Amino acid sequence: MNTIAIDQGGLLERIDELLEATYRSADLGNMQDPLAETIYIVLSKQTREAVYRRVYAELRQRYPRWTDLLEADPSEIEKLVAPAGFQRQRTEQLLGILEAVAAANREHRTGPWATPRPQDLNLEFLRELEAVDAERFLKALPGIGPKSARCVMAYALERPTFAVDTHVHRIFVRLGLVKSNGRKRDHDPFQDVVPPTMRKRLHINLVHHGRAVCRTRKARCAECVLVSFCDAGRKAVAARSGPVAVDLFAGAGGLGHGFRKAGFRIGLAVEPNRHAAQTYRLNNPGVPVIEAKIDESTDARSLLRFMPSVKRIAALLAGPPCQGYSAAGARRPHASVNRLYRHVSRLAKDLMVEVVCLENVPGVQRVNGHGFLNTMRNSLRRAGFATEAHLVHACEYGVPQHRARYFFLGKRGEEAPPRPPPTHRPPHAKQTPETTHLPATPRLIDLLSQLPAIDTGVVAERFTRADGQEDYNLSTMAHGPAVVRKIREIKPGSGPISYRRLERGEARTLIAGHRAMPVHPTRHRTISVREAAVIQGFPRNYIFCGPRAEQPLQVANAVPPPLAEAVARTVLICLKGTEAATR
């Protein structure tokens, strides 16, 4: 299989991006003052977070100045720190630290010995030292080892050091970034592989991930966004129950997300584009995603290698690139991209799947005199699947888009899966006895009105509302005055392909022309990626990764998740009662 090579630097970048999008470097309670951080760390060892936070707060309330604590009765200090345990040892460490700091302050003529304005005891003089000297001083303090010293360096002194606690050590070893060195912790091999600008942020997010997901015991691999890079994690998720689907040409995950929502377990997703693969990983935790191209070198064995313990695959999903067929593309009938469906048929046969779901644009009917509709259908039939091509419209499945797509649904045996029944009634559709009971497809403008009103040229990849709710990918293009004047004149439903204004009720197929999106129905700008995602039926918390310029194609090329879910439910009905539906 033509797998994209990812070096260690690229792997760390992907890990950092996924963890930052998940945890956002959420505050761990660390202090900006180096002496306060040092005391805080001593109290935090071998006790629960809620306890050491409370003990620190009570200690500071009782002794608002560090000189007060240094002069306090040790027995009184022991009483205060008792809830954290080891009270005698901690008290000795606290007083030892303050005595050493006092001696250093006296030497540097700072703190209580500063002139003309004496201050409290402090470690501010460390900011003037070389990193190696500052770290050496900290490690000489009672109760402060290499990890604690580097935490103080990173959190309070803003030095690019990388602290290795139990969470960092465990996750790095599981991901194969460093080799396990048992109980002995040499921090330098860990720090050496992490770029300086990434160290503090990555450390914080690794601590969160180690506490919440990648735990010592009972790791929650099915909730892990890093499972793609973890051999143990892939093995753990492969052993879970449920009908398994493999997602080829996975993109940002629209088709796979719909199948997951219907009850499928995605055993593996394959997508060559780095940013789309990251989007899939972030929004579908527990799903291994490999960056690879599907070509002649891709065989069943290479795919199964990433799914150890999977015994049977229920469905193969595939949405090969549509540029060779699309009206918006070059439409060259002999282009190699137009024949990628052959690999889908071959792999479906070799993987012995029960059902195939192949999706593409209506342009497959004819490409400059060459028809592909029957060719694709017959390819699947020759592979052993009874197949029909169903032309469906997204607006019949709750998506306010007149987006037509062919779904080639094939099943082993003599009967092909039927057309997925509509779940909604589009406003323009005539009511029939079969559709009267269905809910109406929501209007496009009503969906967009639920999002914050954003002007042109606003960077809002993470937008926090007044009520604390967050929205993502809301950034808008910075149109110049001439472009805004041009957009003002565009009527709903008209305009060039790159600046077509959307209508209020229903859109045509979203097209990301020049990496931009269509024009908003009422605002004089192109829509944001989040607005496009809402029109496509993605959940509000589905985040798109990568630079802003890389996001529009991810959304526009995706299968709308509500449509994918309807297809998946039809597939599940076909699988009902078979062995594949229970594994």
Image (spheres, rainbow, N blue to C red):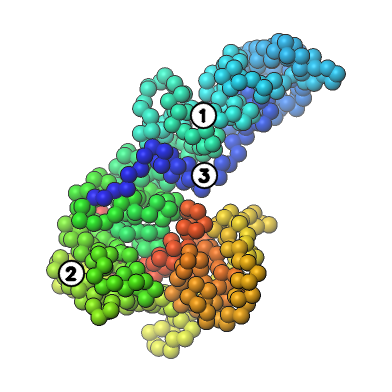
Q: Do the residues labelled 3 and 2 touch (CB within 8 Å)?
A: no
Q: How far apart are marks 3 and 2 (CA)?
A: 43 Å
Is residue 565 left or right of 400 when viewed as pictured? Answer: left
**Residue at numbered disc 1:** 162
Within 10 Å of the Cα at label 2, are there few (<14), some (14-19), or many (20+) other Cα atoms? some
Is residue 334 left or right of 191 when viewed as pictured? Answer: left
The label number, if any, that marks residue 267 in the structure image: none
**Rendered-image quadrant of the C terminus:** bottom left
Q: Residue at x 32, y 38 (%)?
A: 232
**Residue at numbered disc 2:** 379
Q: Do the residues labelled 3 and 1 touch (CB within 8 Å)?
A: no
Q: Which of 119 and 576 is in front in this view?
A: 119
Determine whether 521 is above or below 302 in the image.
below
The amino acid type found where label 3 is placed reads Glu
Across and down, in percent, residue 486 comes to 60, 76
Q: Which residue is drawn at 20% across and 64% down?
A: 342
Is residue 300 left or right of 154 when viewed as pictured? Answer: left
Q: Which of 576 and 275 is in front in this view?
A: 275
Residue 392 can be seen in this image: yes
Q: Residue at x 61, y 80 (%)?
A: 489
Within 10 Å of the Cα at label 1, are there few (<14), some (14-19), or many (20+) other Cα atoms? many
**Residue at numbered disc 3:** 20
Q: Which of 221 and 133 is in front in this view?
A: 133
| Nearer-N-terminus badge (1/2) | 1
Determine whether 523 is above or below 7 in the image.
below
Q: Which of 387 and 371 is in front in this view?
A: 371
Q: Is mark 1 on a helix, strand or loop?
A: loop
